[in-house]
């Protein structure tokens, strides 16, 4: 009788456990693998009540902003859970990019291989030009089915059209400082730390070092510099980077993220 009760209890426990929302989309990050921590936020934070006119007036052409509560991506979020992505896209070949500032070298592998063997924590000793992960290169048309489900941030720039790019990477990965046209970025699963400088203030960094190396070696000297803007985005939060603002990123957890590039 005892044994049966025990079995019933174990069964109930595992049922309960399976139903809990673990809230990482199965992109598990072990505590000891979190090689970088979230940081402070000195970028203006707005909520979803920010109007398009206010966006244009206050931020679009002048400074970054973080927007909370403007994303409505439950569907996209559910489709980017690990098991769902693997089921739908495991067979596909993905193109990884090197994590340095300018020379994005490329490497191809199956999405399944990438998820199973390449989403590991960034090693502090690894250089950016020798680190490859999935971001910025999803020209493959099979991703379009997924990207169509993404609900973009509800703001726009006149005479600019959006293009989406999604990525997926392990804790401690990120792209070092670089700049390009304006756009938004949103974290879907996991947290991501952002660092920015205005266009006329070139940050101190080596283009082949990783953001993690920059964080350890340079950040302590510049963290109080008023030109350094930074924030850690939680899932569902959006950051806007204006035209030609320098930016570097750092994934705190195993993360799924998406950028909306705005081009004339
Ligand atoms: C990566 O960059 C470093 C420093 O710039 C350089 O010494 C090294 O040869 C590069 N590695 C590769 C594989 O190109
Ligand atoms: C960075 O790495 C790339 C590719 O590995 C190499 O061609 C380039 O010379 C390196 N840049 C610097 C500044 O070391």
Image (tube, rainbow, N blue to C red):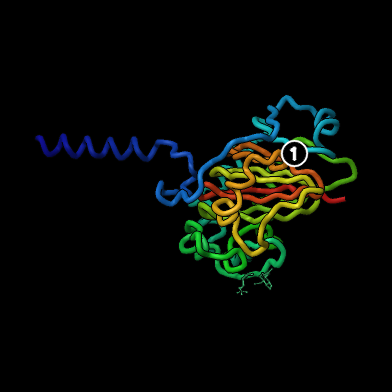
Q: Would you say 45 lies left or right of 116 here?
A: right
Q: Position of residue 6 (x, y in %)?
A: 17, 37
The residue carrying mark 1 is 64
Nearest the viewer among 92 and 178 is 178
Q: Position of residue 3 (x, y in %)?
A: 12, 39
Q: Would you say 106 lies left or right of 37 here?
A: right
Nearest the viewer among 20 and 15 is 20
Nearest the viewer among 40 and 66 is 40
Residue pictured at 72% horizontal, 35% vertical: 65
- Up/down of 63 relative to 164, above or below: above
Q: Position of residue 109 (x, y in %)?
A: 56, 69
Residue pictured at 63% horizontal, 50% vertical: 249
Q: Position of residue 200 (x, y in %)?
A: 81, 48
Residue pictured at 85% horizontal, 41% vertical: 157
Residue sitting at the far right: 159
Q: Would you say 70 lies left or right of 3 here?
A: right
Q: Quadrant of ligand 2?
A: bottom right
Residue sitting at the far top: 49
User: Few, some or many C-alpha atoms within 10 Å of disc 1 (few <14, some 14-19, many ≥20)?
Assistant: many
- Up/down of 85 relative to 102, above or below: above
Q: Quadrant of the N terminus?
A: top left
């Amino acid at each position: 009788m005892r044994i049966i009760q025990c079995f019933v209890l174990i069964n109930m426990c595992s049922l309960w456990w399976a139903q809990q929302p673990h809230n990482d989309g199965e992109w598990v990050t072990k505590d000891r693998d979190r090689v970088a921590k979230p940081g402070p936020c000195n970028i203006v934070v707005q909520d979803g009540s920010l109007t398009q006119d206010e966006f244009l007036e206050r931020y679009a052409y002048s400074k970054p902003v973080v927007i909370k509560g403007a994303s409505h991506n439950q569907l996209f979020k559910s489709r980017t859970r690990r098991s769902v992505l693997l089921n739908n896209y495991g067979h596909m070949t993905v193109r990884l990019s090197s994590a340095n500032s300018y020379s994005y070298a490329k490497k191809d592998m199956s999405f399944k291989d990438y998820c199973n063997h390449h989403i590991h924590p960034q090693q502090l000793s690894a250089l950016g030009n020798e680190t490859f992960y999935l971001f910025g290169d999803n020209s493959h048309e099979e991703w379009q089915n997924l990207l169509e489900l993404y609900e973009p941030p509800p703001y726009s720039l006149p005479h600019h059209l959006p293009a989406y790019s999604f990525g997926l990477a392990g804790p401690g990965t990120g792209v070092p400082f670089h700049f390009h046209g304006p756009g938004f970025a949103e974290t879907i699963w996991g947290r991501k730390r952002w660092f920015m400088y205005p266009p006329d203030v070139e940050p101190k960094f080596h283009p082949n070092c990783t953001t993690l190396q920059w964080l350890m070696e340079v950040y302590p000297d510049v963290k109080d510099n008023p030109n350094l803007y930074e924030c850690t985005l939680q899932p569902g939060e959006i950051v806007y980077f204006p035209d030609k603002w320098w930016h570097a990123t750092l994934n705190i957890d195993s993360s799924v993220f998406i950028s909306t590039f705005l081009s004339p």
